[in-house]
Every structure is written in C-alpha cells, then in structure tokens.
Image (spheres, rainbow, N blue to C red):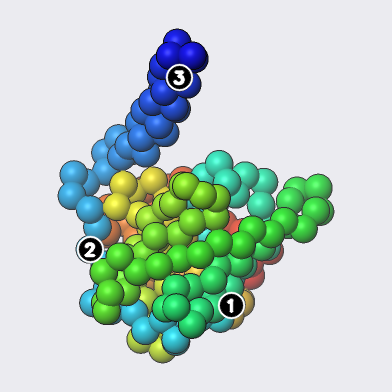
Amino acid sequence: MHAMLRSLALSWFSFFSIFAYAGGTPRGAPSKPPEVVASVDLKRYQGKWFEIARLPNRFQKDCFNATAEYALKADGKVSVTNRCKSITGEDKMVVGTAWSTNAPANTKLKVRFFWPFSGDYWVLALDPAYRWVIVGGPNYKNLWILSREIPLESSLLQKLLDIAAQKGYDTSNLIFDPNIQLR
C-alpha cells in the first residue's frame, strides 16, 4: 500500500514539475513581468470580443473565428465563454471562470477552464472606450489582441502590434485570424 501511494505521489510530483517547467519565459523575453493598465471596469469589459491575433498556444490549435464573451457574476467573478471554429468546420466552445487577483484594479485575473489549472489573464492595454484590448501573461508566452467589432482599421492594428512589442512580446509569431478584415 505504501509503495502504491509513494508511486502515485511521485507521478503527481512529476506531472506538476513538467507543468511548472512548461510555463517558463520564452528566450529573449524581458526578465520582469509586463506592466498592466491602471484599472479595468469589469462591468464595461463584459460582452463579446473578437480575436484579431494571438500567440500560438496548445489550447487554440487549429482555431479560427474565435470570440470571447465575458459576463459578470453575482459573486464578482466573471463567466468566460470562448468559441471558435476548427479547421474541419466544427464549432468548439469552452466555458470557464475568471477572478481578479488585484481587486479593485482588476487588471490581473486568473482564468480557470479545467480544475485545478488556471492561467494568467493580464490586461496590458485597453482602449478608454473599451473597443479593443491587449491581454497577455507575466511569462510572455500568451498574448491576444481583441476587438469589439470587425473589420479593424489597419492603422489601429499596427498601433496594437507596436504596443505589444513595446511591452516585450514577440509579435513576429502572432497568428492572425484569416477571416478578420482590415479597413
């Protein structure tokens, strides 16, 4: 019995060690975390956002036409519904929960789609009218550029790419949604 428990404990330790290592910072990324905006009004943030571009990640592999919908819950947490189409045309959807880790600023959130795992969701840049947002994480591995509406002005897209690069993100690897049109 003790051998079985020890084996199970070692398996879990190995799994979490690999998981923690996979969360490292990409080569060439700044050594300190990126700055976030001063504050986010979660009531204004809720609603539908269209994904314009993202850094590659395993959980959105082969996704396009991606959207994220946020709704404030009675307990102050945020319901998160991500949708996309797969390259085979299949509709994909995942529902999760987000919560602020720095209330009342609400600029650093954790998002959980599958217990016990959660990820960082930091608001790096936000339009004062809440028309666009740049979201990433402190390890520079995840980045999303989202907009309330499409098509997007090409000059605005360039501005958002410049902001992300100035914050230390490698924008050369961004995946742009093929269905997002520019004006």
Viewer-proximal residue, 79 or 140? 79
Q: Residue at x 31, y 71 (%)?
A: 107
Q: Which residue was labeled with disc 3?
A: 5
Residue 7: image location, x then y, percent: 46, 15
Viewer-proximal residue, 36 or 127? 36
Viewer-proximal residue, 42 or 27? 42
Separation of residues labelled 3 and 2 (CA atoms): 43 Å
Regarding residue 3, the answer to whether it shows in the image is yes
Q: What's under tag 2, amino acid-wise?
A: Glu
Viewer-proximal residue, 70 or 135? 70
Q: What's under tag 1, amino acid-wise?
A: Lys
Q: Which residue was labeled with disc 1?
A: 48
Residue 52: image location, x then y, percent: 55, 65
Q: Which residue was labeled with disc 2?
A: 35
Q: Residues within 10 Å of mark 3 (few under 14, many from 20)?
A: few
Q: Nearer the viewer, mark 3 or mark 2?
A: 3
Label whose residue precedes the other's in the sequence (1 or 3)? 3
Q: Are marks 1 and 3 in contact (CB under 8 Å)?
A: no
Q: Residues within 10 Å of mark 1 (few under 14, many from 20)?
A: some
Q: Nearer the viewer, mark 1 or mark 3?
A: 3
